[in-house]
Image (cartoon, rainbow, N blue to C red):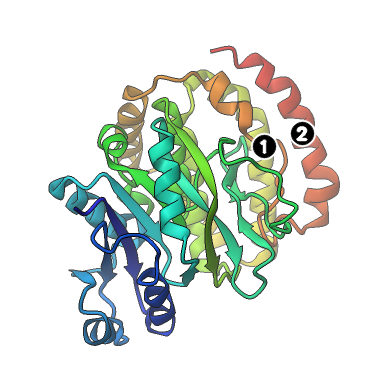
């Protein structure tokens, strides 16, 4: 009986997919209990031809267009619902799984019925002693980043049951009965923040996002961020804030939000992505987009069972990992102390 779909969204993935699939089919978990499903976003690099010839046991869904990470995985979620599959596990195509990876992940999910998501411990493929993500974190202004980045796995102190703000979409199990209540990825996000959005939504609905420390996966991680993608990152960050926070919380964070936005505008001009930043801002000037965001907000708030004061209790006050932003000395020496000071007092006002 199939208990798990392992979902891989592919797009021009030929150079990575063989190592990924080889590791997935070497799991010490019953082959009659999981099925690998590829949701392909209109690939033209030979990925599907290779998979069909080498791995005929893989089920392939050919999307007619590039649906992004969110839309591609939603296709698999819908299929799992139709076939009444309890769990869907997402993995990036550029991973290699430890032989006990899936067994440990399922065991953790089985033992934690309130967990909406369970993330594997993600290590760096080229530096396998170092952590890529031990669970993702959320800044109170909506920035998301990886937890435990570059820590040694043997000195890592988090217990399996410690709650995280949200799970990384790189290697995460979702419980379908929970997603049926909270909804799937927001397809409007396309890419960036879609896992943050869903993880926050799970917590609003009263579920947890936890780590399966013994479930190990190795990620061929490369931090990269093209200028064109700053638009999605900034637009989606605003969308999460507007749909998830209580209106009163939005007023509490507004002064610091505006101050940081001024800094982001300066940063965008200095680094050549001001057009993308402007596009993200003007997105919310379009009445059609505003109505869409408000409709999303109504859906998100309708599932709320947890108050903001509990949600924000594990949010971060500093920007600890945002690549080139985090490495900026202004952020380190001026921005973070101000952000930390503001949040120390502001979160005390969030009593709702």
Q: Which residue is mark 1?
A: 316
Q: Percent x, y for residue 73?
A: 30, 56
Q: Percent x, y for residue 166?
A: 51, 42
Tell me which residue sits at (48%, 22%) in the image.
246
Q: Which residue is mark 2?
A: 340
The front one of 192 and 213 is 213
The front one of 67 and 90 is 90
Q: Residue furthest left?
A: 82
Mark 2–mark 1 CB contact (< 8 Å): no
Tell me which residue sits at (67%, 65%) in the image.
271
Q: Which mark is residue 42?
A: none
Q: Residue furthest top?
A: 351
Q: Is residue 243 visible?
A: no
Tell me which residue sits at (41%, 57%) in the image.
102
Q: Is residue 251 visible?
A: yes
Q: Nearer the viewer, mark 2 or mark 1?
A: 1
| Position above or below: 21 against 352 | below
Secondary-structure class at tag 1: loop
Q: Percent x, y for residue 315?
A: 62, 34
Q: Percent x, y for residue 297?
A: 36, 31
């Amino acid at each position: 009986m199939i208990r798990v779909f392992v979902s891989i969204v592919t797009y021009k993935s030929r150079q990575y997919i063989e190592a990924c699939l080889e590791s997935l089919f070497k799991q010490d978990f019953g082959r009659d209990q999981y099925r690998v499903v590829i949701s392909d976003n209109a690939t033209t690099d030979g990925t599907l031809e290779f998979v069909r010839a080498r791995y005929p046991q893989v089920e392939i869904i050919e999307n007619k267009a590039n649906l992004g990470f969110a839309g591609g995985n939603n296709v698999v979620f819908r299929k799992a619902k139709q076939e009444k599959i309890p769990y869907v596990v997402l993995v990036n195509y550029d991973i290699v799984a430890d032989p006990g990876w899936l067994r440990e992940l399922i065991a953790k999910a089985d033992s934690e019925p309130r967990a909406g998501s369970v993330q594997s411990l993600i290590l760096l493929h080229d530096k396998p002693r170092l952590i890529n993500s031990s669970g993702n974190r959320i800044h109170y202004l909506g920035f998301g980043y990886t937890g435990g980045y570059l820590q040694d796995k043997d000195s890592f102190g988090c217990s399996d049951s410690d709650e995280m703000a949200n799970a990384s979409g790189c290697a995460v199990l979702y419980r379908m009965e929970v997603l049926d209540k909270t909804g799937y990825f927001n397809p409007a996000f396309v890419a960036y923040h879609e896992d943050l959005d869903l993880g926050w939504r799970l917590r609003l609905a009263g579920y947890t996002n936890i780590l399966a420390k013994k479930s190990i996966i190795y990620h061929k991680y490369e931090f990269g961020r093209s200028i064109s993608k700053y638009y999605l990152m900034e637009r989606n960050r605003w969308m999460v804030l507007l749909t998830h926070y209580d209106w009163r919380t939005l007023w509490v964070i507004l002064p610091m939000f505006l101050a940081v936005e001024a800094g982001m505008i300066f940063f965008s001009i200095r680094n050549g992505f001001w057009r993308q930043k402007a596009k993200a801002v003007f997105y919310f000037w379009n009445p059609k987009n505003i109505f869409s965001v408000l409709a999303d907000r109504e859906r998100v708030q309708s599932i709320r069972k947890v108050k903001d004061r509990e949600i924000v209790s594990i949010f971060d006050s500093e920007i600890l990992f945002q690549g080139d932003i985090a490495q900026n000395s202004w952020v380190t020496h001026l921005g973070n102390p101000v952000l930390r000071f503001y949040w120390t007092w502001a979160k005390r006002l969030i009593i709702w």
